[in-house]
Image: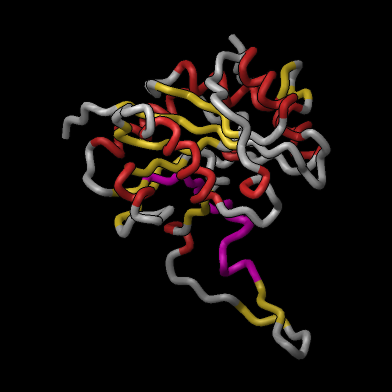
Amino acid sequence: MHYTGKNLGIITARGESKRLKNKNIYPCAGMPLIYWTARSALLSKLDIVMLSTDDEKIAKTGQKLGLEVPFLRPKELARDNSKTLPVIQNALDHYLEKDININSITLLQPTSPLRREKHIDESLNLFNQNKDCTVVSVSKLPTKFYPNKLYRIDSKGEAKNIEDNNPQAIVVRNGPAILINSTKTILSGKLYSEKILTYEMAYWESIDIDTIEDLLIAEVLIKHYGYNE
């Protein structure tokens, strides 16, 4: 299927973070954490890569990295309980008001530093080969988390087995590191279309930075796999 519109990438980065202060610009392998997502996005097939943030420091960092930062996100869209959909709609409206035809919207969280440009491009290819779908990145559930190794604790404090006949088929959203939608889906007020396709990434590529321990693991992997080469 051929599309003529632009592929818009949106990196969402709030200023406040509870566990790791200034997380989105916290040093990671010698660079601000957001650098790794910005780099992959700018090297990908995305036509526009914009940063949605409410924080001036993050905005300035994004601009230095080459991201479009056309405005600061309204504070009401940057709270702990703020939903993702209005944030995407807010960013999309900016480009639609400029009469820019947007084919796809790719949401990229800055806390997934091991996502490479190939992951974005392959996800976009999957999206463009299908009609009216949502593409979300996932990773396979590690064997140590298979349901047949887990217990559910009931109201009496007793452990009950969790049954699943095919644990190998279980995948989990990895953040998501990548979430792609059509303009039609977003304008209809939905974050996911009825048809959801998954793009699988390795479990180690799916690390989501939430704590200093996550960050330390990511730094080791970034250096080991030569992400900045």
Residue 101 part of the magenta segment: no
Percent x, y of residue 156: 76, 90
- Quarter location, residue 158: bottom right
Using residue 105 as the reference point, say whether residue 222 is left or right of it. Answer: right
Percent x, y of residue 5: 27, 28
Percent x, y of residue 40: 52, 21
Give the residues in magenta.
Answer: 135-150
Residue 138 part of the magenta segment: yes
Viewer-closest of 150 and 75: 75
Which residue is at a point 73% across and 43% down the rendered structure image? 210
Viewer-closest of 162 and 128: 128
Percent x, y of residue 69: 57, 24
Using residue 160 as the reference point, say whether residue 177 is left or right of it. Answer: left
| Outermost residue, left side | 1
- Is 122 located above or below residue 160 in the figure? above
Which residue is at a point 78% across and 31% down the rendered structure image? 216
Which residue is at a point 61% across and 78% down the rendered structure image? 161
Q: Quadrant of the C terminus?
A: top right
The figure's colour scheme reads: secondary structure
Q: Quadrant of the N terminus?
A: top left
